[in-house]
Image (cartoon, rainbow, N blue to C red):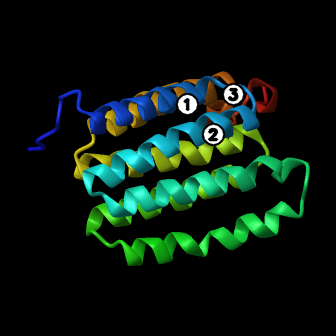
Amino acid sequence: MLDLPTDVSPVQLIGYCGTVGGMLWPFCRGRVAMLLAQLATVLCFAIHMALLGAATGAALNLLTALQVLVAIPLGTRPGFRVVYLMLLPAIAVLMAATWGGVQSLFAAAAMALMSVGRYQTDVVRFRGFLALGLPCWLAHNALAGSLPAMLSDIIGSAVNLWRLGQAGAFERLWIGRFWKSPRSCRS
């Protein structure tokens, strides 16, 4: 059973500041707004994870901050695509350098999936990849013992999935593949 801290120490307060951002970014409509909200979130979680002793989580959140800054101009300045892609090998390097067991593997998997998401200029694709990465962060954060980060992941996932549903992402994924539309059925 996890022994999760429920106190309001500075470590937890910093984590809860990250939780606020983690719960709010999915409400943003545009890609740049989502990225800016994530920037504040990952900076808080980098400090929180470092204070908890979760070195891989802290390092990958710092890398995410850099990645977010490079991802912002991707839609308008194609030259940043090369710079962005050059950051991807750092995920494996940081995981290896800060290895803390299976929680490091979950953090790296989350970062890899979310990196593909942040590379997208289409908001629905962006949200889709983040929806895949958030459960990996949840596993990391549970193993690291961070209640604020777990709350951020759970609520952020729920809101992000809701927003994907509003955008019709699930209809495109499932209905078109498994059910024939009335127009395609012959009488």
Amino acid carrying label 2: it is: Arg
The Cα atoms of the two marked residues, 1 and 2, are separated by 7 Å
Quarter the N terminus occupies: top left
Q: Is residue 112 left or right of residue 30?
A: left
> Which dot, 2 or 3, sits closer to the camera?
2
Q: Are marks 1 and 2 in contact (CB under 8 Å)?
A: yes
Count neighbours of disc 2 (C-alpha within 10 A) and say few if under 14, some if 14 to 19, many if 20 or more. many
| Residue 166 makes an appearance in the image | yes
Amino acid carrying label 3: it is: Gly
On residue 168, the disc is: 3
Q: Which residue is mark 2?
A: 127
On residue 160, the disc is: 1
Residue sitting at x 46%, y 44%? 134
Label 3's element? Answer: loop
| Closer to the camera in the image, 22 or 43 | 43
The mark that comes first in sequence, 1 or 3, is: 1
Q: Residue furthest front?
A: 10
Count neighbours of disc 1 (C-alpha within 10 A) and say few if under 14, some if 14 to 19, many if 20 or more. many
| Closer to the camera in the image, 126 or 180 | 126
Quarter the C terminus occupies: top right
Residue sitting at x 65%, y 21%? 166
Q: Residue 178's spot in the image, x, y percent? A: 61, 40
The Cα atoms of the two marked residues, 1 and 3, are separated by 13 Å
The Cα atoms of the two marked residues, 2 and 3, are separated by 12 Å
Residue 124 position (above or below residue 80): above
